[in-house]
Image (cartoon, rainbow, N blue to C red):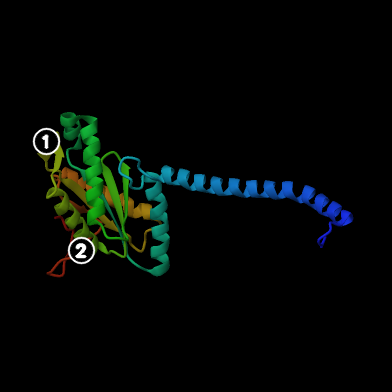
Amino acid sequence: MQGPLANPELQSIYDQITFMTLPAGYTGMAIFLLFVLASDLSEELRELAISDQLTGLLNRRGFSEQAAMAYATSRRTDRPISVVVTDIDRFKQINDEFGHSGGDEALFAFAELLKLGRREEDITARIGGEEFALILPGAGLVDAMEIAGGLRSLIQASPIEFDGCQRTMTASFGVATLSRKDTCMSDAIVRVDRALYKSKRDGRNRIDLESSQMLLAADGTLAPISV
């Protein structure tokens, strides 16, 4: 608008507009960048809050959040869903023999085997100590037992090396599936904890169901399955 020769009046207006708007523009851009950085930091902090730092799996908090979401999805879509809890057998002996660093190696290796043996859609977590859990969307009781069986075989066939010594690990498993009368995923988790306790009590390196969950046997009767 000023043309080849500057117009003093228009130049004055331009200077005033620039004086008033540039600081606001810079401030707005700075605030926007702060929001972006804060959002990234918030997401990173959330990931840290729900992740197990040793194994990279979900921790108990992350598992609880995912379990609640999986329960809601199962109810909405009417798809089956099962839970598997597994515990490294005689983990204390590994700690006693190879120290806490050896125990950490065992936990990390165990988590990697779970990642390797699970399905892509399965949710895996370390929920405390040497105890791990998987949520199996779309898996009924028979499917869950087969998945747990595959994991058990993989773990037993994959020895871990400690200071040049190979040690075979085994694990005990409990399996439960969501029933129609369950009001939340915690109901299935209570059953799966009982099943794991049964597996440990009855000799370890087993897969068990809680007694209330039965499968149809070949002869038409209902019976709990232990592997």
Does the rendering let one see residue 211?
A: no
Report the residue at 14% width, 53% height from top.
153
Report the residue at 24% width, 32% height from top.
101
Residue 149 located left or right of residue 27: left
**Residue 60's image quarter?**
top left
The crowding category of the residue bearing disc 1, from other C-alpha atoms within 10 Å (few below 14, some 14 to 19, many at least 20), is few
The residue sitting at the right extreme is 9
Relative to 201, residue 144 above or below: below
Number of disc labels? 2
Frontmost of labels 2 and 1 is 1
Which structural element holds mark 2?
Answer: strand
Q: Nearer the viewer, residue 52 or 74?
A: 52
Q: Point out residue 34 in the picture as x, y percentages from the top left corner.
A: 59, 45
Report the residue at 18% width, 46% height from top.
171
Does the rendering let one see residue 32?
A: yes
**For the residue marked with disc 2, what is the amino acid?**
Leu
Q: Point out residue 3 in the picture as x, y percentages from the top left corner.
A: 82, 62
Q: Is the C terminus in the top left, top right, bottom left or bottom right quadrant?
A: bottom left
Residue 97 located left or right of residue 86: left
Q: Which residue is mark 1?
A: 164
Which structural element holds mark 1?
Answer: loop
**For the residue marked with disc 1, what is the amino acid?**
Gly
Q: Which residue is mark 2?
A: 215
The crowding category of the residue bearing disc 2, from other C-alpha atoms within 10 Å (few below 14, some 14 to 19, many at least 20), is some
Report the residue at 28% width, 46% height from top.
132
The reply to whether discs 2 and 1 touch (Cβ–Cβ < 8 Å) is no
Relative to 104, residue 184 above or below: below
Q: Point out residue 80 in the picture as x, y percentages from the top left corner.
A: 32, 65
Q: Is the N terminus in the top left, top right, bottom left or bottom right quadrant?
A: bottom right
Q: Earlier in the sequence, mark 2 or mark 1?
A: 1
Q: Point out residue 152 in the picture as x, y percentages from the top left corner.
A: 17, 52
Q: Nearer the viewer, residue 123 or 143?
A: 123
